[in-house]
Image (cartoon, rainbow, N blue to C red):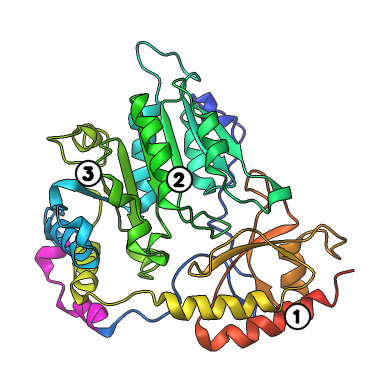
């Protein structure tokens, strides 16, 4: 029977999702630069593991934790400063969105001492829209430091710092930022972490695009000093395996901080499927330089060099995403639609990102062989802009 409304949480019923993840490229698209997955091929060694999957792997619930050892070893090999890292510092989930959701449940759900709609989180705008969706659907209050258009959406850590308050139950910073692709210096992240620690609050550093910056700038480097720091990472971006839904958090082990102990109380007991664990471990064991930051920097520089009329938000060369916006007249009134209709280029509309609108898009770099095509498309598109 149509039209019947059941007893659904009113925070969810009254909320409109901002998520852009289900925006598929329309027919006729010649180049898809939307969702942020590394376009480089997955090593054949990783894919060959699919042929070795046994019935037992598929039949039984996932319990194998060797992926945790593989993640710890991977980072120990990448940085001399991370030799302390073990599997006791790591927890896996169904992508970072799963982990972020559980962190929100852990810190932002109302409890006996706090009524609904009184827990607060401080993020920044713009940032990953699915996180904002999750906060609002839990009935928590999403506060944000608003990065200013007049400053090309540059993240100013002092402004974020000054908005931090003990009224916030959780702090979150994306590094690199989605959708701008800018990298925040670790010094600035540490300053925020120290302030959060003084308030007895967790700081989540969402490093979904973290494989696109040097490991020395990762907040993983802060965990030994700041037990309140939680870093989330994924296999979806730099490793190009979004389909296996494998993400993880790194934080202090339970002997120093009880984050993981409490986190396990709210997670899905059998999350992160067995096949994802096998493929993820195989990729990590290769210990390859994925992605190649020098190639990305060169490609991004070439693309940015042809953009004359649109504005590029503050960004970093090693990250494969950037935000483009245009303040003048756009033929379709919507930059995503305009680029799609006029040059058959598909991007992510920034209409759902706080602080941005439909005159902005997020663009993901394609594979190297398509860079010249992208440059030509953008140059041609700008000829139609007044």
Residue under the point 37% across and 51% down? 96
Q: Position of residue 177 (x, y in %)?
A: 51, 54
Q: Is residue 138 magenta?
A: no
The image quadrant of residue 78 is bottom left
Q: CA distance from mark 1 to mark 3?
A: 48 Å
- Judging by the rendered image, the residue that carries numbered circle 3 is 224
Q: How many marks?
A: 3
Compared with 319, 105 (above or below) is above
- Circles 1 and 3 in contact, beta carbons < 8 Å: no
The magenta-colored residue range is 45-58
Q: CA distance from mark 3 to mark 2?
A: 17 Å
- Judging by the rendered image, the residue that carries numbered circle 2 is 188
- Judge from the rendering whether residue 214 lies leftward or rightward of residue 344; answer left or right: left
Identify the secondary structure beneath mark 2: helix
For the N terminus, the quadrant is: top right
Q: Is residue 283 visible?
A: yes
- Judge from the rendering whether residue 322 lies leftward or rightward of residue 251; answer left or right: right
- Judging by the rendered image, the residue that carries numbered circle 1 is 379
- Circles 3 and 2 in contact, beta carbons < 8 Å: no
Residue closer to the observer: 297 or 380: 297
């Amino acid at each position: 029977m149509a039209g019947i409304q059941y007893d659904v949480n009113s925070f969810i019923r009254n909320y409109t999702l901002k998520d852009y993840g289900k925006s598929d490229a329309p027919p006729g698209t010649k180049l898809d630069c939307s969702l942020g997955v590394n376009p480089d091929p997955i090593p054949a060694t990783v894919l060959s593991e699919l042929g070795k999957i046994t019935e037992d792997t598929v039949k039984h619930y996932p319990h194998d934790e060797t992926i945790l050892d593989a993640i710890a070893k991977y980072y120990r090999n990448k940085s001399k400063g991370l030799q302390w890292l073990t599997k006791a510092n790591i927890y896996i989930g169904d992508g970072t969105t799963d982990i972020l959701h559980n962190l929100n449940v852990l810190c932002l759900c109302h409890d006996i001492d706090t009524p609904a709609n009184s827990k607060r989180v401080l993020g920044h705008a713009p940032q990953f829209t699915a996180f904002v969706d999750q906060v609002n659907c839990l009935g928590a209050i999403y506060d944000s430091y608003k990065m200013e258009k007049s400053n090309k959406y540059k993240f100013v850590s002092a402004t974020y710092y000054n908005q931090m308050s003990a009224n916030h139950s959780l702090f979150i910073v994306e590094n690199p930022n989605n959708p701008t692709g800018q990298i925040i210096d670790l010094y600035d992240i540490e300053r925020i972490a120290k302030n959060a620690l003084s308030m007895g609050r967790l700081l989540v550093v969402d490093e979904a695009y973290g494989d696109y910056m040097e490991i020395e700038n990762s907040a993983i480097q802060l965990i030994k000093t700041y037990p309140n720091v939680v870093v989330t990472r994924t296999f979806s971006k730099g490793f190009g395996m979004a389909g296996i839904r494998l993400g993880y958090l790194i934080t202090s082990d339970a002997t120093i901080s009880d984050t993981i102990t409490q986190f396990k109380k709210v997670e899905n007991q059998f999350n992160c499927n067995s096949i994802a664990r096998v493929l993820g471990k195989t990729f990590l064991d290769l210990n390859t330089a994925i992605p190649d930051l020098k190639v990305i920097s060169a490609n991004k520089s070439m693309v940015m060099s042809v953009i004359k009329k649109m504005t590029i938000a503050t960004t970093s060369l090693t990250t494969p995403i950037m935000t483009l916006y245009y303040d003048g007249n756009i033929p379709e009134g919507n930059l995503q639609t305009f680029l799609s209709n006029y040059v058959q280029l598909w991007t992510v509309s920034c209409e759902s990102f706080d602080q941005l609108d439909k005159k902005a898009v997020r663009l993901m770099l394609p594979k190297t062989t398509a860079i010249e095509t992208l440059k030509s498309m953008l140059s041609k598109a700008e000829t139609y802009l007044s």
